[in-house]
């Protein structure tokens, strides 16, 4: 609790900040009473602070009375800030101060006034970096939580849209916001999400990835993430309409969506802006690209090493002729090219933009003609890895598990053959079908199968049929969530 004495309160604030350069104290006299205006450098708008707060405070004519009467008068009649809160709790006041609020304290008052005049700089709303769309909106989430909430409210103008705030991180005090439609979300889902977030014991939360592990399956054995991420407000609004919960994390443009289904990795907002037959074609193409990215290198290594009879004779002769000039086996070649490609990809992501063209040129030379002409790898192997790499970009949300599984399947195919690949495929399918996301089967509506839900799974029906009824996530087959 705050003290009544202004001197004691200031000493407490100054002791906690211990001479920090960004902690600013402006002493005032308001109607003959000592006061103090506290703020953090760079977190408040100085122009608004001077014009809307300090100038009215100094120039106002206060009625006679004690500090409590003056505090009530300036709160109700002097200050025009829309966002202001009266507080008596010290920890809450400290949190608001470091969130961009200014604090006004009067001597003789145990309450203070927190005034919302935030003015910190942030990145403007722009096109999402990882979810580019041809027909969708050209705006994505940004770092400030309040702006992200505004973008959702603009698209869902209903009183059923609720925002519920939580705090995570003992040191960072990061604000989290649960976003959902009250009339569509399952109360059981909402309660489970709250419990997991409140049980996340972390010192700091600096990105959505900090809290994602606490929202996944507790066994931790899932190959694919059961937590969805999105940078697009329109995509998140579509998920919320299906009874899901979105978690906005202050300081990051990535929004967590729960529950998350495996087939959603192959869907995008463009599917709903295109003709149904073309949307179905694109989804099937993404599924084909996923299987190519996952299994093609392992299949090629297994067929070339153990089952050459499965390869057409002209192609087999080309592969054999290419391998005569290389010192390594096909499995070693595939592993080497795969690792080199991952190195070049990571370098392209992390290198400064000024070096991006140089990295691209060197990568093309290393993985291209130079590798083949030097006799280190064969041209067919290089072609297989190149097709695999391009295919993996069609489903960017699955890139990480696909890259690791691809390396494992190359080793399995090169040591055991097709029997090993079939066993690995069976285990992956069983793992995928066994997982769930907050009581909803991860493989739904394929496993368990639902014919009615297939209207927006691999295929997509037209809007005259899709618009008749919005299927809630808790209504999917196999879901244990209560409607």
Image: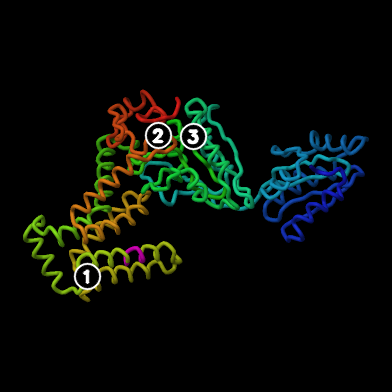
Task: Say which mark, if any, is on residue 155.
Answer: 3
- Residue visible at 34% across and 67% down in the picture: 360
x%, y% of residue 121? 61, 53
Taking 289 as reference, is 128 left or right?
Answer: right
- Residue visible at 87% across and 34% down in the picture: 69
Task: Say which mark, if any, is on residue 377.
Answer: 1
Taking 41 as reference, is 199 left or right?
Answer: left
The secondary structure type at the circle numbered 1 is: loop
Looking at marks 3 and 2 on the same chain, the residue that comes earlier in the sequence is marked by 3
Looking at marks 1 and 3 on the same chain, the residue that comes earlier in the sequence is marked by 3
Q: Residue furthest left?
A: 313
- Residue visible at 35% across and 41% down in the picture: 262
298 to 101, vertically: above or below: below
Q: Which residue does the numbered mark 2 point to in the structure image?
A: 440
The secondary structure type at the circle numbered 3 is: helix
Alpha-carbon span between mark 3 and mark 2: 26 Å
């Amino acid at each position: 609790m705050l003290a009544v004495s202004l001197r004691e309160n200031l000493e407490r604030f100054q002791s906690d900040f211990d001479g920090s350069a960004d902690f600013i104290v402006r002493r005032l006299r308001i109607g003959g009473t000592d006061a103090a205006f506290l703020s953090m450098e760079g977190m408040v708008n100085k122009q608004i602070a001077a014009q809307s707060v300090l100038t009215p405070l100094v120039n106002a004519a206060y009625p006679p009375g004690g500090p409590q009467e003056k505090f009530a008068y300036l709160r109700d009649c002097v200050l025009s800030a829309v966002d202001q809160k009266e507080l008596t709790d010290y920890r809450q006041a400290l949190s608001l101060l470091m969130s961009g609020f200014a604090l006004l304290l009067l001597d003789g008052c145990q309450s203070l006034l927190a005034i919302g005049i935030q003015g910190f700089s942030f990145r403007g709303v722009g096109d999402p970096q990882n979810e580019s769309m041809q027909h969708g909106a050209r705006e994505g989430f940004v770092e400030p939580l309040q702006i992200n909430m505004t973008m959702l409210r603009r698209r869902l103008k209903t009183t059923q849209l609720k925002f519920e705030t939580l705090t995570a991180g003992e040191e960072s005090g990061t604000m989290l916001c649960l976003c959902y439609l009250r009339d569509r979300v399952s109360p059981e889902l909402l309660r489970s999400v709250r419990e997991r977030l409140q049980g996340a014991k972390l010192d700091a939360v600096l990105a959505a990835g900090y809290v994602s592990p606490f929202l996944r399956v507790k066994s931790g054995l899932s190959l694919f993430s059961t937590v969805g991420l999105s940078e697009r407000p329109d995509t998140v609004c579509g998920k919320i309409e299906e009874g899901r919960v979105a978690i906005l994390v202050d300081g990051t443009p990535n929004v967590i969506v729960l529950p998350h289904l495996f087939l959603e990795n192959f869907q995008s907002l463009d599917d709903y802006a295109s003709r149904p037959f073309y949307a179905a074609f694109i989804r099937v193409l993404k599924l084909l690209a996923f299987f190519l990215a996952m299994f093609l290198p392992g299949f090629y290594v297994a067929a070339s090493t153990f089952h050459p009879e499965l390869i057409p004779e002209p192609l087999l002769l080309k592969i054999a002729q290419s391998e005569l000039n290389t010192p390594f086996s096909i499995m070693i070649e595939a592993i080497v090219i795969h690792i080199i490609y991952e190195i070049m990809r990571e370098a392209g992501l992390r290198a400064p933009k000024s070096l991006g063209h140089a990295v691209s040129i060197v990568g093309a030379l290393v993985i291209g003609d130079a590798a083949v002409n030097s006799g280190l790898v064969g041209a067919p192997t290089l072609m297989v890895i190149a097709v695999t790499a391009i295919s993996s970009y069609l489903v960017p949300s699955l890139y990480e598990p696909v890259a690791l599984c691809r390396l494992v399947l190359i080793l399995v195919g090169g040591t055991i053959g097709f029997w090993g690949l079939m066993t690995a495929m069976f285990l992956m399918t069983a793992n995928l079908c066994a997982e769930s996301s907050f009581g909803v089967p991860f493989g739904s509506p394929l496993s368990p199968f639902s014919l009615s839900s297939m209207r927006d799974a691999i295929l997509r029906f037209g809007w005259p049929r899709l618009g008749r009824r919005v299927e809630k996530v808790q209504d999917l087959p196999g879901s244990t969530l209560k409607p």
